[in-house]
Amino acid sequence: MDSVISEIKEKLDIVDVVSSYIKLEKTGINYRALCPFHSEKKPSFFVSPTRQIWSCFGCGLKGDIFAFVKEIEGVEFGDALRILAKRAGVELRSQDPKVQTARKRIYDICELATKFFEKQLHLSSTGGKAKEYLLKRGLNKESIMKWRIGFAPDLWDSLMKFLQEKGYSIGEIKRAGLILESEKGKVYDRFRSRIIFPIFDLNSQVIGFGGRVFGKDEAQETAKYLNIPNTVLYNKSQVLYGLNQAKIPIRKNDGCILVEGYTDVIMSHQAGVQNAVATSGTALTPLQLSVLKRYSNNLITAFDMDIAGDSATKRGIDLAQAQGFNIKVAVLPDVKDPAEMIAEDPEAWKKFVSEARSIVEFYFNSAFSRFDAKSHDGKRKISEKLIPALKRLQNKIEQSSWVKELANRLMVSEASVEEELKKYVPSAALIAEAPKEIRGQEVKKTRKDIIEERILSLLLNYPDGFAHLEDRHFGYFSPRIKEMIVKIGEIESKNFKEADFSDEDKEFLDFSALKGEVEAEMEAVEKGTGIAEEIQVCLKELESLTIKRELEELSDKIRIAEQEGEKDEVEKLCKEFRCLTESLSGGHNDSRISKHQ
């Protein structure tokens, strides 16, 4: 296993892996980004190509490529290993089916089911009719193959029997979401006489399915579209259809187009607009938004939008706006969905998307078209619709501009609009929930811990700094940090990797070195004089904290001696106390330290 992990790490560069999920920006010798694991406005997530590690100095999460994939995909190590092995072209030794993880077997069931449905579409007579229907709708053969569209025959147990013959149990097939059980205990296929759209994860592995009814009287069907329920692989609140194909185009175009249906996505990609994904008929959720934020803060909606009432669609868009997304609305022509528009004229679709207007402009036009801006009641209703949208604007200059626009169109003062804006309190559902605890955060550190680790990180990036350490300074450090500094100081190269450290200590030093690099880059601390001065400031602060701790201990001893009537001991202790106090009288400048706390 160790050799496989090493081989994968040798073949994959951490910058390439991380940048396939989030947008990285070069900064000095490292890369930075907004952390995908917690909400932030300034980037605190850094990737080191030289060390092949990443660390978020905001939430505390850190690690190598395996830790990153585990976190961002929400999987265990075994699944992260498979994902990265596939990417690296490293073959993993096959396992006995008995010891395969339950999760892996569900993946295999989904893959086999996809092949079953594909075969039915291309080889069965009814499937052929379904394929003909798809071609008439505008999908070409390449798209049908690329998106692995299939067909479920109008039989009760064809897929179930197929999977059983492959060695999978009823329980496993049920956990994959592919069969149902009646009240009488009879099990049968979930999808029957439906065109099947496989749903993929970010690595293009099938994790679920959606089915459109075909070959039956649609009026008699309870649902035109049917999806599997949530499983160990598929979570409808998190998955966006087509994101596996669209993630790179989204980053390249710095924008994502949101449509409603599977065919809308496929047709858009077929037309060359490949940064489109589908919400699959559901409202945008916080989980979906957190995934999209890895790639872009710009969204274009291309489905029915109505500011009337409190629709699920509007709540999802409002939530995105509250979380800082820049949103534009492409208003669809009457009785047309994107797939129909693209089938008629692909170029019209491109023009349609390019002419999308801002969400606030869309809300303004909708509100003013529905209510009379000259009547008192109309003014109130318009303001009730638009004030929440203005409140959610993150950019204050943009907000101020729209406040002026609203005041002018309602023929009221800007001050009155500002007053209503101040009074409005957003719904709790639209306020991004902060996590109760930050997952990667270490045990709360003391100021002394912070400063001595700061010194260590500076020394790792500026070996000449060891010359500024005096014998008295070593008494200020905790035993662990002292041992590290002594060991590194004894090495001529000052490279900690040449010292005899445990794997745990080497990892700690690696991340400490990265932190020192990042802080030096962010603060533009010049090597040489700048870092030397910084080390001196930190040492002085560390000395001060040590003395203050000793003064507290002396105070306790003096109080005890006074209570016991030991006058000579009290006098001796007080003399020590005065000497230590005088050593602090010069003061110290800790302003540069406080920001690292």
Image (cartoon, grey):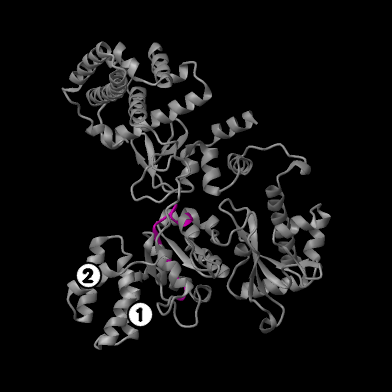
Residue nearest the observer in this picture, 256 or 570: 570
Residue drawn at the location 77% of the way across and 44% of the way down: 97
Marks 2 and 1: which is nearer the front?
2
Q: Which image quadrant: the N terminus?
A: top right
The amino acid pointed to by label 1 is Ser
Provide the residue designation for mark 2.
Answer: 418
Q: Considering the numbered disc 2 on the image, is that residue within a helix, a strand or a loop?
A: helix
What is the CA distance from the residue labelled 2 to the residue labelled 1? 21 Å
For label 1, count other residues whose C-alpha is less than 10 Å away and answer few (under 14), some (14-19) or many (20+): some
Magenta segment, which residues? 291-304
Is residue 23 depicted above or below 187 in this figure? above
Is residue 259 depicted above or below 332 in this figure? above
Instruction: Please indicate whether residue 324 sits to the left or right of residue 346 in the image.
Output: left
- Residue 531 position within the rendered picture, expressed as x and y whole percent measured from the top left: 26, 25
Q: Which image quadrant: the C terminus?
A: top left
Q: Where residue 366 is drawn, which disc sits there?
A: 1
- Residue 340 position within the rendered picture, expressed as x and y whole percent measured from the top left: 53, 76
Does the magenta-highlighted stretch encompass residue 294?
Answer: yes
Residue drawn at the location 48% of the way across and 65% of the way down: 284
Q: Farthest front residue?
A: 565
